[in-house]
Image (cartoon, helix red, strand yellow):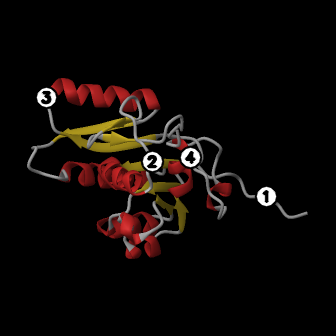
Amino acid sequence: MPQAWPARKWMLFVDGENLTFRGQTKASETSLRLQEGGYFQKDSFLWMANARPVSLPEDPMGFVATLEQLGLRGYYYTSVVGDDEKLKGVEECLWRIGFTPKVFKKDSQVRRSKGVDIALCTDMLTHAFQNHFEVAVLLAGDADYVPLVNQVKSLGKLVYLWFFSDQKSGLGPRLRLASDGFISLDNQFAKSWLP
C-alpha cells in the first residue's frame, strides 16, 4: 500500500482590492446580487457568504487535497476611502469573518492602493522565509505578483493561485503559469451569492 503524504501547512493571502472590484464586475455580468453587510461593502471588501478563510476552497482539480483541513491564517488586504471609523468598521467585518485584516486608507481619486500590494508581498515573503507554511494560497489575478510567486517558490514553497478563471475577470496568464496550481473561484463565488 502506498504511503500517504502528510497534509501540508498553508496560509491564505487575499488581494481584497482585486477580488472586490473583479467580483463586483463578475456579479453584475452574471446577475448575482451582492448584498451589503458582513461579507460585502461596495468598493471596500468582498468575501463569499458563510465561507471561512481558513477552510479549504472548493477545488475539482484536486490541488487542495494535499493541504491540511484548516489553514494557519488568512490575510485580507484592502484599502478604503473614508475616515478612521470607516477603516475600523471594515477591519471589524473582516476580523469577524476570520481574517487577519490589513486595511489601508486611500484617496477617493485613486482606484488601487500600493499599500495593499506591498503589504501582501512583504507578509507572504516573511512567512515563507520563516517557514510558517508549506503552501501559500494567493487569491489574486494581477500579473504584478509573478515575481512574488517566483521568489516564494525559490524558498521551496508551493504557491496555489485562486481566482476567477477567465482573463476577462482580470486573471493574468503569466500569473497562472507561474503558480504551482490553479483553483477556480467561479463556482464557489456564484454559489455563495445565489439568492
Point out which mark residue 32 bears. 2
Residue beneath label 3, please? 83
**Residue 165 in the image, given as x and y percentages of width and height:** 48, 66
- Describe the element under mark 2 as helix, strand or loop: loop
Q: Are marks 2 and 3 in contact (CB under 8 Å)?
A: no
Residue beneath label 4, please? 191
How far apart in space, not on screen, are marks 2 and 4 (Cα)? 10 Å
Q: Amino acid at mark 3?
A: Asp
Note whether 119 is above or below 169 in the view shown: above
Residue beneath label 1, please? 4
Q: Residue at x 53, y 69 (%)?
A: 180
Q: Earlier in the sequence, mark 1 or mark 4?
A: 1
Mark 1 or 4: the one toward you: 4
How far apart in space, not on screen, are marks 4 and 3 (Cα)? 33 Å
Q: Earlier in the sequence, mark 4 or mark 3?
A: 3
Quadrant containing the N terminus is bottom right
- Describe the element under mark 4 as helix, strand or loop: helix
How far apart in space, not on screen, are marks 1 and 4 (Cα)? 32 Å
Q: Amino acid at mark 1?
A: Ala
